[in-house]
Every structure is written in structure tokens, then in C-alpha cells.
Image (tube, grey):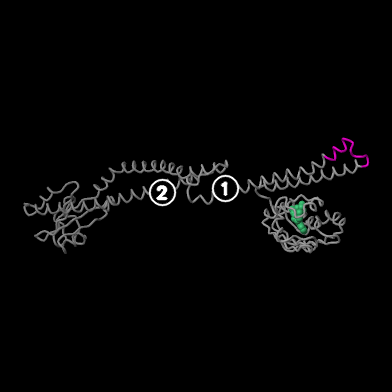
Amino acid sequence: MKKRLILSFFYMGLIASIIGITSTVLVYHSVLKSEMSENLKNECEIVAAGYSYLTSLDRLSVFASDILRITLIDPSGNVLFESKAEAVNMENHLRRPEITEALANGSGFDIRISDTIGIEDYYYAMKLTDGNILRVSTDARSVFAVVGRSFYLLVLIVALIIVFSVLLSVKITSKILDPVGKLYSLIENDEDIDTTSVYPELVPMIDEICAQRKAQESMRREFTANVSHELKTPLTSISGYAEMIETGIAKNEDVKIFAGKIKSEASRMLTLVSDIIKLSQLDDSETTELSDTIDLAVIANECKDELDLEARKKGVEIYVKGKGETFPGNYVQLHEMIFNLMDNAVKYNRTNGNVDVTVSGNSICIADTGIGISEENKSRIFERFFRVDKSRSRRGGGTGLGLSIVKHIAENHHAEINIESTVNVGTEITVHF
Ligand code: ADP
């Protein structure tokens, strides 16, 4: 960003200086040109004034110089005198524009590029009282000489402009970007931001970032509190049972029962910790690799095999039907997602209920004949640790994190989740990829 800004300012300076210098040279040239023609006219008038006093035409040479050429032409175009070449060898001049013009209007002017050296030649011609045409001319070497003399000055000015535009662009860029950098470090360090000292255009964005940070912070705090609470409950039971065994309060026949309770509480804790790890892994990974070829029906059948025993114990039957299209995704995550949804459909089902899993196209639908979810709880079931009936969830080994994991995985796959549910009738959750 900084480099780009500096470069744009530098180019702006460079382009502006090129335009400025080019237009100055053009204006310079045109001023010199008009001055030159004016001078030439004056010279011609002076020569014309002296012409009538000349004893011979050759005397015209006294007016000529290195830079001023004088030509005298008769009305039919023949050269009578020429200060620079042999007059007799010269072709007829009648067709020269300045001569034609002088014959018609009394005076004429023309600028031509000289054949030999590519330099502009300036001509001024005037009709004399005896009908002859007097022409004076000079070449533009003098104009170029003036520009040439200024050449080094122009190079110096361009160099100065370049140096100046580089320095200025660095300064302006830091002036623009410094407040943004400061703002970034304030946001990074979670410090208070005085919105009166930042660009007004950035205020809505800062407000949004601050609000998001606050929400994230409170979510994090709530999550930590929930985790501590959820871990404390089984730990309290474990330590209680262990104490009873240790102190001998537990009778011999109870020891086995208490050991079983300790085992089930410990396994609850393990499930909880493993769910927390899964969630934090999903939170941490910025992008999920979606490089596996996913067949939803295959995954659903795998989950059915894993859940069948548990379902049978509850008298619940799982059916998987349909065939979908394959698409790229993350196998481990999608297996976790479908397992969680089917596990819930078994857990929150009634005895002798069904779980119907239907795969079609890019979507999977898990329908159960269970307790259902009320309208008000529908929007909350994806929250971390939210459970409609805490003790029922706990009995089924639930942590309240299953659907949060599902939601996260769906987001990673840009999938949409839709829930249809009626209390005491059943729930139908569709995930569309
Ligand atoms: P849990 O570990 O408690 O199952 P989840 O995040 O998977 O946690 O689900 C959150 C809550 O949503 C559950 O406690 C339950 O109350 C409700 N729920 C989830 N799936 C279903 C379902 N198929 N039928 C009825 N209620 C459900």
C-alpha cells in the first residue's frame, strides 16, 4: 500500500513536470517565433529605406550578415541580388509563398524547413516602390540556440522536480498512512480509540470492529465459564464417589457401583473435552481443506453402522436411502457433522421411533419421530452448551456442543441448514451443500 501510494505520487509529479516543461517550451518557441518575424519585418523596412540611396544593387550586401540574408527579386521572379549565393544561378522565385503574397498584398511572410539541415527558415518580403521585391531571411538557429542554452537549466529543473516529488510523496504517504497504522495497533492491542482523531470515513468500520471484538470477548468469557462449570460437575461426582470408597463409607457391594459411576462421569468428561478440542480446532483453522470427494450416502451408511447398536437399544430403527452427487469437501468434518445429526435423531427419539436419512443431489435430510423442538428453541439449539432439557441431554451423553460443531462445519462448506420441527411429532434437519 505504502509503496503503491509513493509510486502514484511520484508518477503524478513526473507527469505534471513533463507536461509543464513541454508546454513551457512550446510557449517559449511560439513567443520567439513571433518576435523573430517582428524583427525580420523591422530589418526589411530598414533595408528598404536604405535601398533608394544605393548606387548599385551589390551595395545591398552592406545590410547582410551571417544571420541575415538579403534577396532582391524583380516582379517576374528573377533574382537580382542574393547575399548568400550567386544570384545568376538561382531559380525563379515567383512561386515562393512570401513573394506571391508580397506581390499581391505588399508584404509576405513564410517559415520553411531548410532542405539541408532541417532548420526552420524565416522569410519576410515586401514590395518596393520600383516594383521589385525585397526579401530578408534568417534561420531559426538562434531560436534553437536560446532553447539549447536553457537545456541544462531544464534538465536541472526536471531533476529537482523528481527529487522533490519523491520526497513529497514519501512525506504525504506517511501523513496519510500513519493514522491508519496507529489505529491498527490500537485495535490490535485492544486499546480505547478516540474516534474524533481518526478519518471520519473509517469511524463506521472501527465501530463495527469494536462491537465485534466486544461480542467475541463476551462469547469467549461465557464459553470459558461454561466449560469450567461443565467440567466441575462430573469432577465433583468423581471426587465424591472416590472419597466414599477411600473413607470406607461405601459398602463392599457399593464399590463396584461407584466405580461404574466414576467411569461414566470420566467418559462424559472425555467426550466434553474432545468436543471442546474439536470446536477450538474448527475455530483456529482459517480455511478448511475441501479436497476429499464426498458421497453423502456413503457417509450416512457409515454413521448408521456406528449408531445401529445404540439405536437398537432404544428400539429406534435407522433407514438410509437415496443417492446424491459427489462434491469436494472435508471427509472428517462431514462425517462428524452427519454423525452428530443422526446421533441427536436417535437420542431425542421415542421408543420404537424411526430415523430416516435421505440423500438427494447435494443435500442430506435427517428426519426423526422424536420429541421435536419448539419454535422459540429452534434458533438457540446451535448455541454452545445450549440444551432444551439438560438432564435428558446428559443422560444421552450429550455435551450441548454437537450442533455448534455442525453449524461450524456447515459454514466451512458454505452449506445451508434448514430445520422443520413439531413438538412430540419429530424433527427434520436438511443440510444443503
Ligand atoms: P447435545 O449434546 O445436548 O445433544 P446438541 O448441540 O447436539 O447438544 O443439541 C443441542 C440441543 O438441541 C439438545 O440438547 C436438544 O435439546 C436439541 N436437539 C438437538 N437435536 C434434536 C432432535 N433431533 N430432536 C429434538 N431436539 C434436538
As drawn, which residue projects farthest toward the top?
Answer: 247
- Residue at mark 2: C-beta within 8 A of ligand 1: no
Q: Is residue 85 left or right of residue 235?
A: left
Neighbor class of circle 1 (other Cα within 10 Å; few <14, some 14-19, many 20+) is: some
From this viewpoint, is residue 337 visible? no
Residue shown at the point (69%, 48%) measured from the top left:
282
Up-down relation of residue 228 to residue 137 (above or below): above
Up-down relation of residue 388 to residue 182 (above or below): below
Q: Nearer the viewer, residue 159 or 116?
A: 159
- Assess whether residue 200 is covered by the magenta stretch: no
For label 1, the residue is: 210
Q: Is residue 410 left or right of residue 395?
A: left
Residue shown at the point (39%, 41%) measured from the top left:
163
Q: Quadrant of the C terminus?
A: bottom right
Q: Nearer the viewer, residue 335 or 73?
A: 335
Which amino acid lies under the numbered mark 2 shown in the image of this protein?
A: Met
Up-down relation of residue 163 to residue 129 (above or below): above
Which numbered marker is on residue 163? none
> x and y percent of residue 151 in the render?
31, 43
Secondary-structure class at tag 2: helix
Please tell me in which quarter of the rendered image ligand 1 is found: bottom right
- Assess whether residue 246 is covered by the magenta stretch: yes
For label 2, the residue is: 12
Q: Main secondary structure of the magenta part?
A: helix
Which amino acid lies under the numbered mark 1 shown in the image of this protein?
A: Cys
Residue stretch in magenta? 240-253
As drawn, which residue projects farthest toward the front?
Answer: 249
Neighbor class of circle 2 (other Cα within 10 Å; few <14, some 14-19, many 20+) is: some
Secondary-structure class at tag 1: helix
Q: Earlier in the sequence, mark 1 or mark 2?
A: 2
Residue shown at the point (39%, 47%) measured from the top left:
14
Nearest to the eye among marks 1 and 2: give it: 1
